[in-house]
Amino acid sequence: MRTPGHLSMALAVSSLALLASSAAAQPAEPGGAGAEDPPQDSAARWNTRSEPPRPAGLAGHVALSGSVAWVLPFGTISEGVSQHDRFGSGLGYQLDLGYGVGSSVVIGVWGQLLTLSDGSGCDDCAGIGFAGGPFVRYHLVQGLRFDPWFSFGIGYRSQSQDVNGVERSYGGLDWARVQFGGDWYALPQLGFGPFVELGAGNFFARPDDEQANGVSWRFMTGLRVAVDFPGHGR
């Protein structure tokens, strides 16, 4: 025969069993203590992972270059007169000074000196030429020692020669100065490499006995030395 004490004990045990079974049946809430967390080491690696550094651009850089090249004038210098008649091939010297306005773009000014040999239509008539103007240059890649580029510019050109004691002078507009080249940087501030140039223009000022007509052309190829501040790739 069960006593009241035994009944109370049985009721208490039954209540505890019901509470335990109901707690075990409830699903764990997302993000709660029962949720499965990712391994701590992989999470730490993810949080500390960084993107690779971007290559430095040319913005704010000062770019100075000098070059020497073989030059060949061709085309016409005035109506019925070819450049080949007046001026032969020779050496050209150039200076460029630019400033980086973007990661790949440099704008600046250029100057040029040409020392030309006798033309085919005269003897002892070597000529000289001066030119200068603005340019924009685009650099194709960043972060490498070899720096390929191309450039476009315009300018004013003057050429003259002495023929039997009489000076003949020409002046006009270079409406296209296109260059292609590449510099290899042996040091962050110093690079060198080849280039080619094709120029085109018209001479409007000329001797009185000649008429303006035609397009004068110029081909150049040579070696360029480039100086970069604060340094290529920085």
Image (cartoon, rainbow, N blue to C red):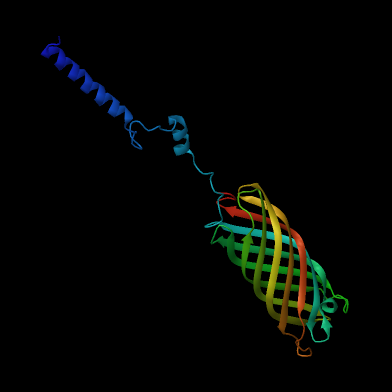
Report x, y in % for residue 109. Answer: 61, 67
Q: Quadrant of residue 4?
A: top left
Report x, y in % for residue 135. Answer: 62, 68
Q: Quadrant of residue 114?
A: bottom right
The residue lying toward the viewer, choosing from 85 and 28, is: 28
List the single residue furthest toward the front.
Answer: 1
Total number of numbered discs in the rendering: 0
List the single residue furthest toward the left.
Answer: 4
- Whether 102 is drawn above or below 6: the answer is below
The residue lying toward the viewer, choosing from 211 and 22, is: 22
Q: Which residue is drawn at the image coordinates 65% and 73% (left, top)?
A: 154
Left or right, 31 with respect to 163, comes to left
Q: Quadrant of residue 167?
A: bottom right
Report x, y in % for residue 81. Answer: 83, 83
List the single residue furthest toward the top.
Answer: 1
Q: Which residue is drawn at the image coordinates 31% and 32% (left, top)?
A: 26
Which quarter of the rendering shows the N terminus? top left
Q: Which residue is drawn at the image coordinates 27% and 24% (left, top)?
A: 20
Left or right, 6 with respect to 120, comes to left
The residue lying toward the viewer, choosing from 72 and 58, is: 58
- Whether 14 is drawn above or below 170: the answer is above
- Whether 16 is drawn above or below 152: the answer is above
Left or right, 68 with respect to 46, comes to right
Left or right, 117 with respect to 156, comes to right
Report x, y in % for residue 57. Answer: 56, 54
Q: Which residue is drawn at the image coordinates 70% and 65% (left, top)?
A: 179
The residue lying toward the viewer, choosing from 167 and 109, is: 109
